[in-house]
Structures are given as structure tokens and as C-alpha cells.
Image (tube, rainbow, N blue to C red):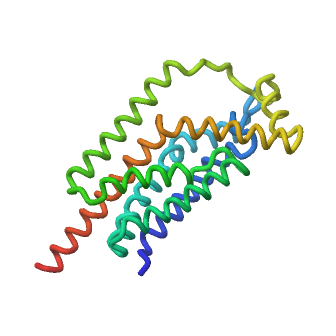
Amino acid sequence: MRNINMDVLRGIAVLGLMFMNAYYFGVFEYGYVTSATPSVADKFINIINLVFIDGRFRTLFCLLFGAALTIQLQRWQSIDALHKRLKVLAFIGLAHGFLLWAGDILFIYACAGWLALKFSHEPNDKIVRMGMLFLLLGALSSFLLAFIEPELLPVTRDSAAFLEAYNAAFSSYLAGFMSNMLMFIIMIIAVPLITLWMAGGLMLIGMYLYKQKSSKMALLENS
């Protein structure tokens, strides 16, 4: 039995993720690059993205992912079955990341799902505590990396940095393929530093919220 409300929310989250990732479909290193004098449309879309989209839909999707793991675990009563599904998801993500686009998120979600499942049978209060702890670890990692990240000059469409990245991606199929593979290797290395903890923490909170709702529904039915 499908949960229609969750399906609708998941569809909205995927559309939001599509909008976020579309920035980086062209040149992965920089995303969408404006001209030296950005148009009003560019400025408007950037504001909409920063205020309403960036980070919001990834959060929603991770929460729903955690809730869905709980539903599947309750239905199958087998954590091994979920591990197999996540393994398939990870392989699809690796193939997508190496062969097509370095910004793949399926591999990240599979790893975060494995992490979240380690606490799936714990009491609700421990699940939410671990979720908050993982979010804190991710935030701390982001904060520390901000100090060592090199300060980059503003990149525009006619800047040397952008033209170099563009030529590396589109001068030939082989050059684009090698550039994509290199960027995905960097992404895999970066996953344990930030994204894994953030996604895993949100999935645990999604598990907690769904279990809380299920407990309240059961109490109402028995009262």
C-alpha cells in the first residue's frame, strides 16, 4: 500500500533537487556561470535558489528516505533485504558518477542509508540523538573546511578559469570523460567529511518522526 502523501512530497523533493543540480550539468566545477555583468534574470533566479531551494529539498528528500527505510523495515522485517537494496543503489550511483555525471547523489544516499540502518532498532530517543549528533558533525566539518578552502576569484563566462574548465569538459569526449571521473573521485573522498553525516543525520530524524507518528496512531486506535 503506497503512502500517497509521501509520494507527493518525494516528487516535490526530486523536482527541487533537479533544479539545484541543473546548475552543474554543464561545467561541474563551477555550475552555472554568469557574464561579467549578470542580467536581471540571473540575479532573480539566484536569489530564488538561495532563499527557497538550495538545501531545502535535499533535506526533505533525506527525511523521506529515512521514513521510507522504516516503512520497508517494518514490512519485510529483514535488515538484510534493505542492505541488498542499498547495495544496488550504490552500484547504480557509482556507474552514474563515473560514466555520466560527477554530481551523482545515489551513492551518497546508499552510504547514508547504511549508516542510518545501524540505529534503526534503537529506541526513538537514541535515534533522534544520533541524528542530531551526525548533523553536528557535518556542520563542524563544513566549518573547519571553510578555513582551509582556497579563496577563489569571482568566475565569469569570459574568465580564464572558466574557459579552462569549459575546454577541459568539452574539447573532446575523452577529455570530458576523464574530467568527470576525476571530479567524482574527489566527490567520493569528500563524502565521509560532510555529506555522509548530514544525510545520515537527516535520515535518522526522518526515521524518528515516522516512528513517532506510528506510535501516536497506534495509541489512538487502541484508545
Q: Which is more toward the observer, 137 or 82?
A: 82
Answer left or right for 107 relative to 38: left
Taking the view exactly as shown, the residue that stands out farthest to the right is 172
From this view, report whether residue 129 is shown above or below residue 162. Answer: below
Residue beneath the point at 28% across and 57% down: 208
Whether 12 is drawn above or below 136: the answer is below
| Residue 179, image x, y percentages | 76, 37
Does 40 sit above or below residue 214?
Answer: above
Residue located 20% across and 56% down the image: 123
Q: Residue furthest front?
A: 80
What is the total number of numbered labels drawn onto the structure image? 0
From the image, which quarter does the C terminus lie in? bottom left
Residue 57 visible at all: no
The N terminus lies in which quarter of the figure? bottom left
Residue 181 picture location, percent across and down = 71, 41
> Horizontal and vertical percent for residue 44?
63, 41
Residue sitting at 51 percent across and 58 percent down? 13
Q: Nearer the viewer, residue 72 or 16?
A: 72
Work out whether residue 42 can be spotted.
Answer: yes
Q: In x, y percent, where is residue 166?
A: 81, 34
Specify the quadrant of the image occupied by residue 14: bottom right
Q: Quadrant of residue 152?
A: top right
